[in-house]
Image: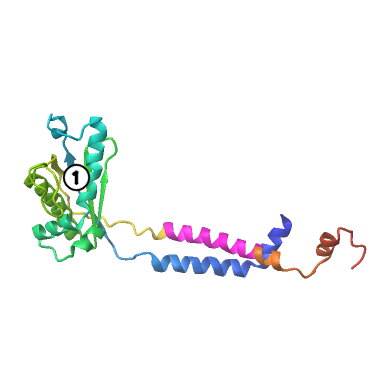
């Protein structure tokens, strides 16, 4: 242990430089601009699941869970995003809106969250509500079994806007502190590994201890 500590002391400059470089990279790749997240909430109903005409079959709770997951995937798609843009009039592409959107079901509930991240809090609110409106509109317009519809069409299964997105006032954390701590730990670990590797590859005899270790005999003189 003393030998390893002495080795690290000798290579302290390498360790410090590696940690500094890791911190600089983490600081460079961490976004600095403030972003805001607006959340709208959908309630996924269950009346259709109770109907005799429903063919989802199987366990009702399992069918409802699958339905919530299916809806979450449908919402985060370009057809729904394009309709949301039409409703809101925001100047953003459907592909870009999909990248800003995250859908997440609340475990053990029938609630589905729609989160939109944007640098403009008003735009984030408008787009989150637009996605909710667009999806509910699509659900109400088509019936399963009577029309296959086109791209982006969804079957009639109950979904209602439980809570509309509010104007976000607090920006999201950039995660800079977390990234810096993680970079420092990884940088230090990498530096220690490099130091140990360099020591393993360094074969010259520099001290009596090295000679004793190699020939397994005690040194009587230097």
Q: Can you identify the residue that label 1 sits on?
A: 41
Near mark 1 (Cα within 10 A), the count class, few <14, some 14-19 or many ≥20, is many
Look at the magenta stretch and give its main secondary structure: helix
Q: Quadrant of residue 188?
A: bottom right
Residue 51 point in image, percent of width and height: 12, 30
Q: Which residues are magenta?
A: 178-196
Left or right of residue 21: residue 141 = left
From this view, report whether residue 172 is shown above or below residue 104.
Answer: below
Magenta region includes residue 118 = no
Q: Residue at x 55, y 67 (%)?
A: 18
**How far from the left and from the top, in percent, is residue 169?**
22, 55
Locate residue 47: give its quadrant. top left
The residue that appears at 52% across and 58% down in the rendered structure is 185
Question: x, y (%) of residue 10?
Answer: 68, 67
Lateral position of residue 203 relative to residue 118, left or right: right
| Percent x, y of residue 120 | 20, 62
Local SS, label 1: strand
**How many discs mark residues in the rendered view?**
1
Above or below, 191 against 57 in this view is below
Q: Which residue shows up at 10% across the image and 59% down it? A: 88
């Amino acid at each position: 242990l003393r030998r390893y500590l002495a080795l690290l002391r000798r290579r302290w400059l390498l360790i410090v430089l590696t940690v500094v470089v890791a911190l600089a990279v983490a600081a460079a790749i961490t976004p600095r601009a403030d972003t805001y997240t607006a959340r709208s909430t959908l309630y996924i109903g269950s009346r259709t699941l109770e109907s005799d005409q429903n063919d989802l079959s199987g366990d009702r709770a399992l069918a409802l869970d699958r339905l919530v997951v299916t809806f979450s995937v449908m919402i985060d798609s370009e057809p729904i995003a394009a309709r949301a843009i039409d409703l809101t009039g925001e100047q953003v592409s459907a592909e870009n809106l999909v990248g800003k959107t995250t859908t997440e079901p609340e475990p053990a509930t029938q609630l589905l969250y729609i989160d939109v991240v944007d640098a403009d809090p008003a735009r984030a609110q408008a787009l989150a509500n637009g996605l909710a409106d667009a999806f509910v509109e699509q659900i109400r317009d088509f019936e399963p079994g009577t029309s296959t519809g086109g791209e982006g069409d969804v079957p009639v299964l109950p979904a209602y806007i439980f809570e509309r997105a509010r104007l976000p006032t607090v920006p999201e954390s950039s995660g800079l502190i977390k990234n810096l701590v993680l970079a420092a730990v990884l940088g230090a670990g990498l530096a220690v590994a490099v130091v140990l590797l360099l020591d393993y590859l360094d074969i010259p005899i520099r001290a009596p201890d090295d000679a004793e270790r190699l020939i397994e005999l005690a040194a009587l003189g230097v």
